[in-house]
Amino acid sequence: LDIGPDISRDMNRCIHCTRCIRYMRDIVGDEVLALSERGHHTTVGPYLEKDIPSEFSLNLANICPVGALTSRHFRFKGRAWLMKKTRTLCAGCARGCNVFAWACEGKILRLTPAENDLVNKSWLCNPGYLSITDMQSSDRILKPTRSTAVEEAAAKIKAFIDNGQAAQVAVLASPRLTNEDNFAIAKLAREVIGTESLAVVLGPQDPRPFDSTEQPLPEWFIRADKNPNSHLIFSENPETAFSDYAGLIETLENLDFLLVVDQKRSKTAELATLLVPEASFAEKDGTFTNEQGRIQKLQAVIEPRGDSQSAWQTAQQLAGFLGAAWKYKTAADISDEIAAKIPGYQELNFDNIPAEGIQLQQAEPEAAKESEATDIEAVDGKDPDA
C-alpha cells in the first residue's frame, strides 16, 4: 500500500512501535500518521486517505525497525550485504548533509543519512535521497564534443596568450564543484593563462540561522542555496558582476569561443563551442565547505561514467597543453596545496578529515587583506546548475 509518492507500507511486518508516528509529530512537526482499528487489524497510516505531504517522509523507511515502511525508489532493488557502503556528502544544497552511498555493480542504488550532529543529525530530505537519479539521467554528458576537445581549447587559449590578449580569456568557477576543482581552476586562470577575469556563479543565500536544530525539520533543514560549496575558498567579500543568470547567458551568447565542463546538459552546455563531461559528486574525491563554514570530505563511490572526470583533472590537462607541468595525482595532492596557501584551511588534510568535518578558521579582516589567497569575483545567479 502506497502512502505517498515515496513510501510504501507492508502491515504484515509492522510491530506497532509508533516510531514513524512520533518522528512525524516530534521531528517533522506534522502529525499526519496514527494507529487505527484494534487488535490484529491495527494499521499505521495517515489520518486522511491522502499522501504524506512532507519533504522528509523518506526518513520513515530509514527509522522503521522491521521494514514495514520502504522507499519506493529503492524497494527490493538490492540487498545490504551485496552493496558497497561509502560515507560521503549530499550535493543537493548548502547544508552538506553526511550520507552513506550504497552501490552495486557500478550503480548507486540508494543514499541513507550518516550521523553528524553538527550538520544534519541523522536526517536527510527527500530531494537528497532522490538525488542519485541525476547520475543516471539521460541529460548526463558522457562524451566530449571531440576526443581532442581539451587540446583544441588549449590551442585557442594559447593564441590569445601569444597575442598578448590573455585578459580576454574569462574563467567561470562553480559552487557545485569541490574546493580542489575550484582551486585548480583559479590556478589555471591566474598562473597559467594570466587572466584576472575569474568569477563564480552563486545561488540565493538563506537568511535563516544554520543551526536552528531545536525547530522542526522544515524550519531549519533544507537551504535556499542549492549549491554544496557556495562558501568558496577564494573570496572574502565577493562582488556582483551579473544581476541574474539571464545576464550571464546573454554574455555567453556573444562569445567567439566557449569551453564548457559540465555534468548535465544546460543552457550553457547548449552554447558551448566545445563540451567536456564532468564527474558527478558520487564519482569524485574532494572537499566541500558548507554554508556553516564546515569543511567536509566527499569520497568517490563509483567510477566516473563515460569519459567524465573531475574538473581539476581537466584543468590539469589544459595547463599541460599550455606548458605548465602540474603533477597532481589525486585530489588529496591539491588539498595539501590548499592547506599551505589558503588562510583558514591550514588544518585541511584529506586523509585525516574527521567524520564531523573541520570548521573553517576565519581569517581576521586585516590578515585576509594581506594574504595571498586567490580571489574569485562572485556572480549572483538564479540557476543552481550554472
Image (tube, rainbow, N blue to C red):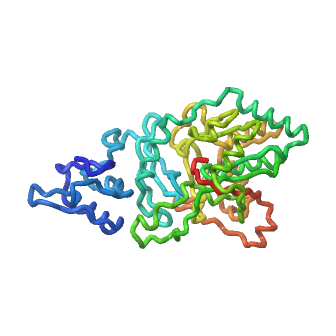
Q: Which residue lies furthest to the left in this view?
A: 39
Figure quadrant of residue 330: top right
Going 55% across and 65% down the picture, which residue do you hit?
206
Q: Is residue 161 left or right of residue 242?
A: right
Judge whether 206 appears above or below 320 on screen.
below
Q: Residue furthest top?
A: 147
Q: Is residue 99 visible?
A: yes
Going 46% across and 44% down the picture, which residue do you hit?
132
Residue 39 x, y percent position in the rendering: 9, 59
Residue 385 x, y percent position in the rendering: 58, 47
Residue 126 x, y percent position in the rendering: 40, 53
Judge whether 227 appears above or below 142 on screen.
below
Q: Is residue 350 visible?
A: no
Going 35% across and 58% down the picture, which residue do you hit?
54
Q: Is residue 136 left or right of residue 371?
A: left
Q: Is residue 69 left or right of residue 136?
A: left
Residue 22 x, y percent position in the rendering: 28, 66
Judge whether 75 appears above or below 335 on screen.
above
